[in-house]
Image (tube, rainbow, N blue to C red):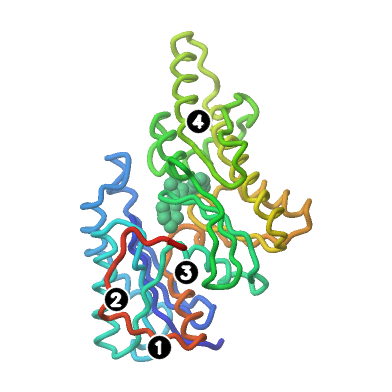
Amino acid sequence: MSGPIVLGFETSCDETGVAVIEGLVERSSVLASQVEEHARFGGVVPEVAARAHVEAIRPLTHQAITLAGIHPNDIDAVAVTRGPGLTGSLMVGFSFAKSFAYALGKPLYGVDHMEGHLFAPRLSFEAYEPPAVVILASGGHSQIVHVKAWGEYEVLGGTIDDAAGEAFDKLARFMGLGFPGGPAIDRDSDGGDPDAIRFPRALRDRPYDFSFSGLKTSVVTYLEKARDNDELPARSDVSASIQEAIVDVLVEKTFNAVESTGVEVVGGGGGVLANRRLRERLAEEADRRGVGLFIPEPGLCTDNGAMIASVAVHRIEGGVPGDEFGGDVDPGLRLNP
Ligand code: KG4
Ligand code: ZN
């Protein structure tokens, strides 16, 4: 193993993630999920999230360092998510990371959460290098990014209303499948027929943009009507059909971008990329076109500290100083403003 040892913190939403990486090799990565705390509200409650980060971050840091088999003095730099995300949650991670780096006398790097998702496949695949098209789909964001070089991003398109994960979450809640909805619909689709119900695919005329609000209305109307007529279809068919409608759009728009940019590398990140059907469909399409597909294991697609640390490794190797002690969180941070 070689390269700097970086301690990475991720607290932008409802998962506290802490990891130690050396170069691009993960030495430890631990997570405290708040799913149960938010499940009874059916979504993430910002105050509850910030409080849970406060409770989790110190023991998790200890755990990450111990599991990595290092001493705190071995750490070369500290990386932390600066935004986008929930203000209170970001502040917990940022202040903790700042104090930790300051106490150790080590550099501090503030990282864009979405750039973390863009970088995550590097932790699994050496061949993942720009130029690339990357699909980012999570609970808060859905974007198609043309990565021209590391640090040089063009957001080609994205959602004009709900993010893909948000669509999964809202529809699962409506169907009574619980929170978070993505994994629930993914599981519930097993054995279901993806073509059972043809839900709408919106914005067909815009090559890189998505919209999921029409899908939501269509599912709600369909199910209410079916209930009134006492003709409710099998739940797995409904789940599989919803999943197919979302996946269809994400795959189509990603490969529109691959075609127009001419890149031969496709990456993916964000919680929705953990979806089995999406992974399968992206793999089929990449194979058909002979382009490389780099989607890491599901645990690196969902929020984690290692992806944040991996962005800092790149900056350290590029000679960028980690001097962000005077900096602050930026809940509205954008990849290319
Ligand atoms: O990237 P992430 O962990 O957190 C954010 O930055 O938002 O993404 C969380 C989102 C949630 O909306 C969740 O429902 C969705 O990712 N998700 C999935 C799956 N696993 C997580 N969506 C579809 N299928 C999955 N297997
Ligand atoms: Zn995320």
Q: Which mark is residue 169?
A: none
**Whole-percent x and y of residue 328?**
27, 71
Amino acid type, callout 2: Ala
Whether the residues at callouts 2 and 1 have beta carbons within 8 Å, the answer is: no
In which quadrant of the rendered view does residue 179 lie? top left
* Mark 3: few/some/many CA within 10 Å (<14, 14-19, 20+): many
Q: Residue at x 42, y 42 (%)?
A: 166
Amino acid carrying label 1: it is Asp
Residue that carries the numbered disc 1 in the rendered image: 76
Quadrant where the C terminus sits is bottom left
- Quadrant of the snapshot with the N terminus: bottom right
Neighbor class of circle 2 (other Cα within 10 Å; few <14, some 14-19, many 20+) is: many
Q: Amino acid at mark 4?
A: Leu
Say which residue label 4 marks.
Answer: 215
From the image, state whether disc 4 or disc 2 is nearer to you: 4
Q: Which mark is residue 97?
A: 2
